Image (cartoon, rainbow, N blue to C red):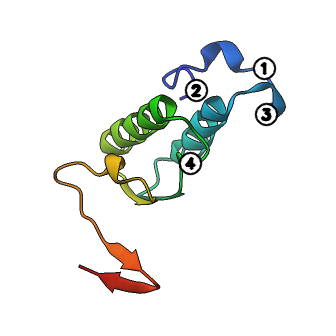
Amino acid sequence: MLSRLGLKDRLTHRPNQLSGGEQQRVAIARALLKKPKLVLADEPTGELDTENGAAIMADLRTLCREHQSTVVVVTHEQEHVQPGDSLIRIRDGRVSG
């Protein structure tokens, strides 16, 4: 799984030796190892720059599609919403249109 996420050369590194994007990819790999039916991702790109954030979301989408998992993402970043996604907006603690 780590190899698929571009981390093959980082297998022996400790968390403090990884960048934020690499740490996020490790978290995705760990979450998907047992092929769960549901993955909950709370701000998976919150600490990343735009380019790394887009890469993380693409990886997450691809792996969940391959494993037939449902992913629920909580985010403030509208650019991660794609056509065909189910979208629920929550404003001030209430579901809004």
Residue at 70% from the left image edge and 18% from the top image edge: 10
Say if mark 4 contacts mark 2, CB within 8 Å: no
Q: Quick one: label 2 or label 3, which is nearer the N terminus?
A: 2
In the structure shown, which secondary structural element does the residue marked by tag 1 occupy? loop
Q: Which residue is mark 4?
A: 31
Residue at 79% from the left image edge and 22% from the top image edge: 13
Q: Which residue is mark 1?
A: 12
Mark 3 and mark 4: Cα distance apart in space:
16 Å
Q: Which mark is residue 2?
A: 2
In the structure shown, which secondary structural element does the residue marked by tag 3 occupy? helix
Label 2 amino acid?
Leu
Residue at 46% from the left image edge and 54% from the top image edge: 36
In the structure shown, which secondary structural element does the residue marked by tag 4 occupy? helix
Question: Where residue 18 appears, x then y in whole percent?
Answer: 73, 27
Q: Which residue is mark 3?
A: 15
Q: Quick one: label 3 or label 4, which is nearer the N terminus?
A: 3
Which residue lies most toward the top here?
Answer: 9
Q: How many marks?
A: 4
Question: Where residue 37 appears, x then y in whole percent?
Answer: 40, 58
18 left or right of 75? right
Q: In the image, which is nearer the foreground, mark 3 or mark 1?
A: 3
